[in-house]
Amino acid sequence: MNTLEQIRAKLQVYPMEVKFPDIRRWQHGNTGVDYVHAFDSGLAGPHVMIMALTHGNEVSGAIAVDKLLRAELRPLKGRITLGFANVEAYHRFDSKNPDATRFIDEDLNRVWSPSRFDSCDDTLELRRARELRPIIDSVDFLLDLHSMHEEAPPLLLSGPLQKGIRFAEETGIPEHVIVDVGHPNGKRMRDYGGFGDAASSKNALLIETGQHFSLQSQDVALDAASRFLIKTGVVAATKLDNFLTPGKILSQHFFQVTQPIVADTIDFEFTQDFRGLELIEHAGTVIARDGGREIFTPYDNCVIIMPSLRHLAPGVTVMRLAKVLDDR
Ligand SMILES: [Zn+2]
């Protein structure tokens, strides 16, 4: 029987290419909620939010929001809110155990449903989500900044609805867009309330910027956040020139997630060193072994989405499978 520590010890160690910003200067905002700052134009327009640190070790988002706050952006119309979510986990980050501070008690990106908010449950993450909830309730357009365990191209997660797909197309970056319903073990912020309601004009995107600690992730987070603010019309492009990554924008490819692969045991391993976006040509190819069980690709041209064993436990999603979505 493996332990999680033994499993993690076998996985690739990534260099720490970025510096964790000291975000304590942003503790006292103007919203009544620590680490959340709002800027109102006084003019009609959307309420646009960029959220960082929904997962405590996903530093690229914190770097981007720190830079945006330092830039003292002011909206042309509507309102901009910039926030850091799981600050407690961020402050407990330890580079010797970099996977440990994704969260403290539970995943903050699995609690966004009224049944959890209204429950008697009391975890550090639920307390933080309850604080953030009134702000999120008033947001029209949300970009939630994340990063990934493994080195892989950035992914934009549009959610399952057509309005999310359209929003991803309008945002235009990155190249790969994942159309998905989220996770069986709890609702994500990007699917909460109006964001997950086809009849609502609210909309949300989640970006996975690349490997947590890579310089590329930092650049992708800042570029994506800036493009999001420009696309939603709340900031003039000229104010964000320095934050945009120069170069050609590639046309986008969309992938429809069809199912999660959930581990039953801790004796789980992939048959290849998957990093994400691998295309497995033939149905019936063995892609993982879980205890005595073999896991096969269920269809031809099956795409591997965000494989990782870093949080392996029975019941945890260790990868998702997707179809290339040509017709949308
Ligand atoms: Zn994340």
Image (spheres, helix red, strand yellow):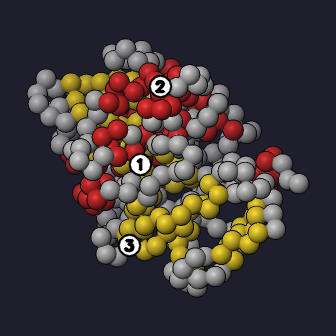
CA separation in Å, label 3 and label 2: 37 Å
Circle 1 residue: 206
Would residue 127 be visible to someone looking at this image? Answer: yes
Question: Assess mark 3: CB under 8 A from ligand 1?
Answer: no
Would residue 222 be visible to someone looking at this image? Answer: no
User: x, y percentage for residue 246?
Assistant: 33, 57
Closer to viewer: mark 2 or mark 1? 2
User: x, y percentage for residue 33?
Assistant: 41, 18
Drawn side of residue 247 relative to residue 89, left or right = left
Q: Residue 325: which disc?
A: 3
Which of the two discs, 3 and 2, labels the residue nearer the N terminus?
2
> Is 296 rendered above or below residue 248?
below
Which of the two discs, 3 and 1, labels the residue nearer the N terminus?
1
Q: Residue 47: which disc?
A: none
At numbered mark 1, what does the secondary structure look like: helix, strand or loop? strand
At numbered mark 3, what does the secondary structure look like: helix, strand or loop? loop
Closer to viewer: mark 3 or mark 1? 3
Q: Residue at x 65, y 81 (%)?
A: 285
Which of the two discs, 2 and 1, labels the residue nearer the N terminus?
2
Q: Quadrant of the C terminus?
A: bottom left
User: x, y percentage for residue 280?
Assistant: 57, 79
Circle 2 residue: 118
User: x, y percentage for residue 230?
Assistant: 23, 45
Drawn side of residue 226 relative to residue 287, left or right = left
Q: Residue at x 51, y 40 (%)?
A: 109
At numbered mark 2, what does the secondary structure look like: helix, strand or loop? loop
Drawn side of residue 80 relative to residue 83, left or right = left
The front one of 54 and 127 is 127
